[in-house]
Amino acid sequence: MQLKPGKGLGELTFGMLPTTVVQKLGEPDRIFVADDDEDELIYQYNGLRMMLTFYKNENNRLGYIRTSNPAITYNGALLLDQPVKTILEGPMKDIKNWQAEKYDFFNTYLNEKNWIVLNVEYERISDLEIGVPLDSDDVYLWK
């Protein structure tokens, strides 16, 4: 599945409705509302190692994807379990302005313009999160 910054992942595009996603991926293994935000409906696909977040207050549109699927690519390169430095200096060198945050057990690299988060453990990308970007007024940029 190819990462498409600002657009989605593989055949999933931001703004899709849950019914369209189910037509493409089948029924999710689990559907739940986020503990910390009742406006977020999450579809979990275990086989794909993916969680899709639909924003209820945005007409139930797909707005966020979190995945640890090892088949994720960008510019033809696999991303997961790769050294983050190699990915940022290679396949993702066209994406600028990464903000690094260090925590006790993991690090994150955020590109706010494209709303991409690389979660890193042991200097390797363990999973990634992508969301629909926001404009300067924090309004979603649905494509």
Image: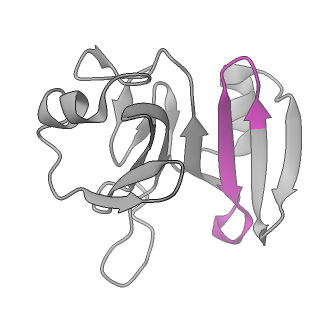
Rendered position, 45 above or below 138 = above
On screen, residue 62 versus residue 140, left or right, reads right
Residue extending farthest to the bottom is 137
Q: Where is residue 84 in the image (x, y as percent from the top left)?
A: 29, 34
Residue 52 is inside the magenta segment = yes
Name the quadrant of the N terminus.
top left
Q: In which quarter of the image is residue 25?
A: top right
Which residue occupies 14% across, 52% down?
A: 96
Residue 46 is inside the magenta segment: yes
Q: Residue furthest front?
A: 104
Q: Where is residue 11 in the image (x, y as percent from the top left)?
A: 50, 25
Please provide the residue range marked out in magenta: 44-59
Residue drawn where x is 66% and y is 26% of the image: 49
Structure colour scheme: one colour
In the rendered image, which quarter is residue 72 located in? top left
Q: Say whether residue 42 is left or right of residue 131.
A: right
